Image (cartoon, grey):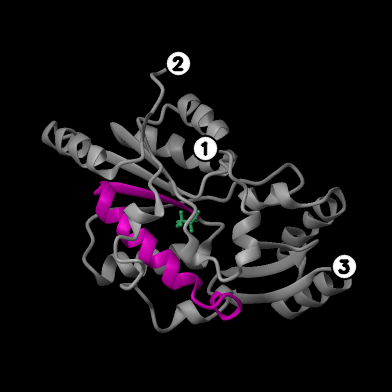
Amino acid sequence: MAYAPVVITDLKQWFEKRHFIKRQGKKIGFVPTMGALHQGHLSLLEKSRRENEVTVLSIYVNPTQFDNKEDLAKYPLTLERDKTLAHKAEVDFLLAPTFEQIYPDKYRYKVSESDFSSKLCGSHRPGHFDGVLTVVMKLLNIVQADRAYFGEKDFQQLELVRGMVEAFFLTTEIVPCPIVREEDGLAMSSRNVNLSAEARSLASRFPAALRDSLSASEAKARLKLEGFEVDYVEDIGTRRLGAVKVGGVRLIDNVER
Ligand code: PAF
């Protein structure tokens, strides 16, 4: 197994390392996460390892993207386990910054988008995408990667990040990565650990309803009948996107239609 990743909590230390990596002309791949790593994250890390000489993983539970304090309090924190998984995945650098390091401005400055961010998840989670875009902008500037890897499960996030990178002439290439699913079809997510046994067994019907229904409204009706609280199901381009709550846990997913 490779060396354990260098764990960096002080960004100054990263800036020095970055200087040397860049001077050696090595390509940097970056996987931003909020930790509680699962197979989906590991697939992003694998792709980054294949395509770059240096892989950087960030673990930062970004408070500004949580519209709901309870959701933030319940977010799983598994740093020691994540370090072991990062080691196995041959991550070179693990950035685990503090709020003070990421937000020296105390979130006085933010990045916002004025159209798509208020739709779908944005219409149910006020301020969520401002928090996401702001932290992603900061992380992209901090890491200065050649490529950054984002999962397609968070499809709206991916589209908004792509748009931001284009709008602000950022130089990191955004690489979309396919959704990784459990055997029964449920998309992997850090929040899945919060599902009770009962909610977990119902949860696999969510992707099934998105996939097997003839229209978004049929999927919505079917999910309601099955006991989900439905935030939305909408067809956008060639995708059907949805968000539901089951047993107090919010799940999002999307399928090609
Ligand atoms: O997708 C996530 O885990 C988060 O939204 C991200 C991109 C790491 C920003 O906090």
Report how far apart the C-alphas of labels 3 and 1 lie in the structure. Answer: 32 Å
Span shown in magenta: 122-151
Q: Residue at x 30, y 33 (%)?
A: 54
Q: Position of residue 190 (x, y in %)?
A: 62, 49
* Residue that carries the numbered disc 3 in the rendered image: 226
Crowd rating for badge 1 (residues with CA inside 10 Å; few <14, some 14–19, many 20+): some
Tell me, yes or no, if residue 257 can be seen here: no
Q: Is residue 84 left or right of residue 2?
A: right
* Residue that carries the numbered disc 1 in the rendered image: 42
Tell me, yes or no, if residue 221 can be seen here: yes
Total numbered labels placed on residues in the image: 3
Query: Which one is in front, 124 or 180?
Result: 124
Task: Tell which residue pokes out farthest to the top in this image.
Answer: 1
Residue type for callout 1: Leu
Residue type for callout 3: Glu
Query: Which one is in front, 99 or 197?
Result: 99
> Is the residue at mark 2 in contact range of ligand 1, meaning its CB lies under 8 Å from it?
no
Q: Is residue 1 left or right of residue 205?
A: left
- In the rendered view, tell whether residue 167 sits above or below residue 96: below
Q: Position of residue 40 (x, y in %)?
A: 56, 44
Query: Which one is in front, 43 or 62?
Result: 62
Q: Position of residue 210 (x, y in %)?
A: 71, 66
Task: Tell which residue pokes out farthest to the left in this image.
Answer: 23
Q: Is residue 26 left or right of residue 97?
A: left
Q: Is residue 203 left or right of residue 30?
A: right
Closer to the chain start, of discs 2 and 1, is 2
User: Looking at the magenta stretch, what is its main secondary structure?
Assistant: helix
Q: Residue at x 40, y 49 (%)?
A: 98
Checking the image for residue 1, the label placed there is 2
